[in-house]
Image: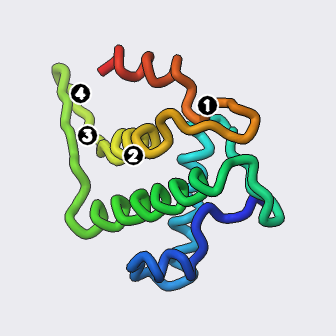
């Protein structure tokens, strides 16, 4: 299993308020979102990382931001968008879009120790064109 991007101790130092079990669930979800966006280009196992210490610090701050965004969304209510087409209608929340934006913002231009960009430039361009 990969090591956490942010430990509960570091989370508390940064001002986190979740208990350890709640934090571990949120950190896991944030890590999975980051792994999805980076196509698992970040590897941390047995305290060894394929990214620099600066990128590790960025990851800590990113996970904290993602957890805070999730908490804020659950306290303030989700941003809901509705669509309708004739008799059919759909409502959805846009939290994933915000998570993706945070990940792209924090990790833009960052590379692993092999020089591979964590966020693919082609993915960034494609998402900008879709917006």
The residue beneath circle 3 is: 91
Give the Cα separation between the discs numbered 4 and 3.
Answer: 11 Å
**N-term mark: 4 or 2:** 4
Pick the residue in front: 93 or 30: 30
* Residue positioned 34% across, 67% down in the render: 71
Tag 4 near tag 1, CB within 8 Å: no
Indicate which disc, 4 or 1, sits on the residue closer to the N terminus.
4
Q: In this rendering, which labeled residue sits more in front, label 3 or label 2?
A: 2
Q: Residues within 10 Å of mark 2 (few under 14, many from 20)?
A: some
Closer to us: mark 2 or mark 1?
Answer: 1
Residue 58's spot in the image, x, y percent?
A: 51, 54
* Label 3 or label 2, whichever comes before in sequence order: 3
CA separation, marks 3 and 2?
23 Å
Image height of 52 relative to 19, above or below: above
Q: Which of marks 2 and 1 is nearer the N terminus?
A: 2
Mark in the foreground, 4 or 3: 3
Image: 15 above or below 104: below
Whether residue 30 is visible here, answered yes or no, is: no
Residue at (42, 57) in percent of width and height: 66
Q: Is mark 4 on a helix, strand or loop?
A: strand
120 relative to 93 in the view: left or right? right
Residue 88: numbered disc: 4
Q: Distance between the residues labelled 4 and 2?
A: 32 Å
- Residue 102's mark? 2
Give the number of the mark in front: 4 or 2: 2
Give the position of the C terminus as an image quadrant.
top left
According to the image, label 1 marks what residue?
117
């Amino acid at each position: 299993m990969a090591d956490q991007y942010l430990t509960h101790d570091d989370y508390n130092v940064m001002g986190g308020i979740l208990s350890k079990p709640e934090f571990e669930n949120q950190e896991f979800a944030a890590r999975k979102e980051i792994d999805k966006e980076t196509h698992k280009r970040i590897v941390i196992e047995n305290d060894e990382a394929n990214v620099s210490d600066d990128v590790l610090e960025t990851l800590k701050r990113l996970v904290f931001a993602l957890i805070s965004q999730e908490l804020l969304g659950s306290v303030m209510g989700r941003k809901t968008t509705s669509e309708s087409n004739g008799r059919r209608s759909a409502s959805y929340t846009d939290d994933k879009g915000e998570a993706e934006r945070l990940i792209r913002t924090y990790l833009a231009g960052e590379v692993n120790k092999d020089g591979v960009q964590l966020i693919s430039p082609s993915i960034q361009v494609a998402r900008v064109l879709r917006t």
